[in-house]
Amino acid sequence: MAASAGQGWWDRVLPEVWLLVEWPQDAEAPANYWLANLSANTAVADLVRLAKVR
């Protein structure tokens, strides 16, 4: 079972999320970060496209 703020309890289990990091080859540090709660079978290309829409 996952966290539920609406029900006022927390079982110390956080939901799994994607961490997408944009790190250009010539950069010393990442340029951007995104967190997403899309399903595990989401294609990486779709994840990147959706992050860039914003």
Image (cartoon, rainbow, N blue to C red):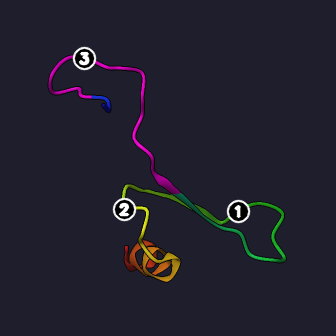
Residue 42 is left or right of residue 30, and the answer is left
Dot 1: what SS? loop
Mark 2 vs mark 1, foreground winner is 2
Dot 3: what SS? loop
> Mainly helix, strand or loop, the magenta region?
loop
Residue 14 is left or right of residue 28, and the answer is left
Residue type highlighted by circle 1: Pro
Residue 20 is left or right of residue 27, and the answer is left
Mark linked to residue 51: none
Q: Position of residue 28 (x, y in %)?
A: 84, 63
- The quarter of the picture where residue 19 lies is bottom right
- Crowd class of label 3 (few under 14; some 14 to 19; many from 20; radius 10 Å): few
Marks 1/3 in contact by CB < 8 Å: the verdict is no
Residue under circle 2?
Answer: 39
Query: Residue at the spot x=41%, y=72% of the render?
Result: 42
- Crowd class of label 2 (few under 14; some 14 to 19; many from 20; radius 10 Å): few
Which of the two discs, 3 and 2, labels the residue nearer the N terminus?
3
Q: Is residue 20 above or below residue 1?
A: below
Q: Position of residue 53 (x, y in %)?
A: 38, 79
Q: CA distance from mark 1 to mark 3?
A: 35 Å
Residue under circle 3?
Answer: 9
In the picture, the quarter occupied by the N terminus is top left
User: Residue 5 in magenta?
Assistant: yes
Mark 1 vs mark 3, foreground winner is 3
Q: Is residue 15 above or below residue 8?
A: below
- Crowd class of label 1 (few under 14; some 14 to 19; many from 20; radius 10 Å): few
Q: CA distance from mark 3 to mark 2?
A: 24 Å
Query: Residue at the spot x=52%, y=76% of the render?
Result: 44
Dot 2: what SS? loop
Q: Which residues are magenta?
A: 4-18
Q: Position of residue 8 (x, y in %)?
A: 19, 17
Residue under circle 1?
Answer: 30
